Image (cartoon, grey):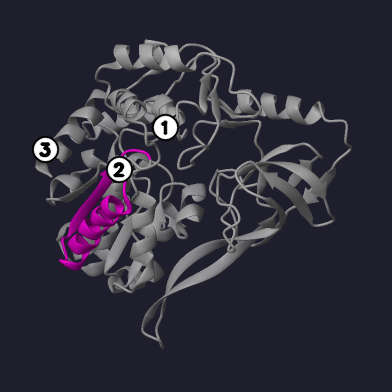
Amino acid sequence: MSATDAEDSTRRALDAIDAEAPLIMVLGGAGTGKTTFLHELRKEPRGRQVFLAPTGVAALQVGGQTLHSFFGIPPRLLNPDEVKPRVQVRRLLKKLDRVVIDEISMVRADLLDAVDISLRIARDTSEPFGGVQMVLVGDFLQLPPVVPRAEEEMLGRMGYEGPFAFNARAFQAREARNVPFTTVHRQSEGDFIAMLGALRRGRGVREALDALNDACVRPHRTGVLPVILTPTNSRAEAYNARGLAALPDAGRAFGGLVQGEFGLEGDRLPVPEQLHLKLGARVMALANDPARRWVNGSVGTVIGLGAHSALVKLDAGPQAEIEAFTWERIRYGWDEPGGRLDAKVVGTYTQLPLAPAWALTMHKAQGLTLEDVRIDFGEGAFAPGQAYVALSRARSLAGLSLVRAIRGSDIRVDRRVAAFMEAFEAES
């Protein structure tokens, strides 16, 4: 994808915002520039806006707050008459011009409806989302919302056709301005892009699988240690434990520091509070370096350990001393004297922004770009979009290898999502 293509997609999305379209859908596959759009939206003031996400980790990445914490919505199924925003929440909601939600594919229909009801109540209007501009960003063909079976059955009894954000009643009440991001720039090989596109949509899967298996079921290219992606936490942790145990160095433990309010509502901390590193350990950076020596997802090998830092030889760059990084937990509020939205830091977590990187779960790899990836499907992918998320992390076929052949059962595409995305792109 050229810089011009990326800029055009971002410009169309920003133009829709500036034209005051009430509901804007910015959807596209992996590596199509959605994160670039979010960065551009932050750069210049466009009214009073908040950046939200469905999970704590996603909220940290977007520099905002979770939907549940911002709106004060409990993490359970709610009847519409149970949605009652607190007084302090109402004051803030009255002042908003825009709500930006990232990772919209993981937002449940009932949660989006609770957001809609909260905004209507706070702003004393029956207009969808209280008249606040909504910008929904993500890819429904990647990871879906987490819905336990009992709750999915209950959602059906409540009248929902499915658990996805586009099944929300509020979504049906407001016509969306669709802005598709369709040109891939993470990969440059036409054949590889076509294979990924087939798996993402569930069309031409057999041909795509045969081509991928022919090219990638092999030992990884020599001279490189790839990041292994696998479906489950237990499998990833086993790879990492074996990798660390095999190193003779005694290593060093780094302790993280939590200050203030930094609960992630069930999500894990971005890096463990006790991080054990050794010389020779494979690690991944989990934050962007202000000096741009590394980015979130950069992989390397530990070649030195200090009291408060690690010296890492980056696979795609020089060696760099990586020191502690501070993640900030944001809570939005309203500054009455200043008459402006206030993004207040209510908690911090300080730790080396490194994680063992012999292996990661496919879920944690969402959003990353990796030069060398080896995929171990183990017992098989268990969620729609999971295999696509894993395969699309790789920049090239040369940098992708498979422990075993991908099976047709590893490729899961929810028909409801596929139908919605077809309609989305047709209307665009």
Give the magenta range.
1-30
Q: Is residue 3 magenta?
A: yes
Q: Which residue is under mark 3?
A: 426
Q: Distance between the residues labelled 1 and 3?
A: 24 Å
Image coords of residue 277 (percent x, y): 78, 41
Label 2 environment density (alpha carbons within 10 Å; few <14, some 14–19, many ≥20): many
In the picture as drawn, the residue positioned furthest to the bottom comes out as 337
Can you say whether 37 is above or below 424 in the image?
Answer: below
- Left or right, 369 with respect to 352, comes to left
Q: Which amino acid does label 2 sit on?
A: Asp
Q: Which residue is under mark 2?
A: 110
Q: Which amino acid does label 3 sit on?
A: Ala
Asked if the residue at tag 3 contacts the one at tag 2, i.e. Cβ–Cβ closer than 8 Å, the answer is no
Q: In the picture, residue 152 is in which quadrant?
A: top left
Q: Which residue is under mark 1?
A: 392
Would you say residue 273 is visible in this rendering?
no
Q: How far apart are marks 2 and 3 (CA)?
A: 26 Å
Would you say residue 44 is visible in this rendering?
yes
Numbered disc in front, either 2 or 3: 3
Dot 1 falls on a residue whose secondary structure is: loop
Can you say whether 283 is above or below 417 in the image?
Answer: below
Dot 2 falls on a residue whose secondary structure is: helix
The one nearer the camera, 339 or 402, is: 402
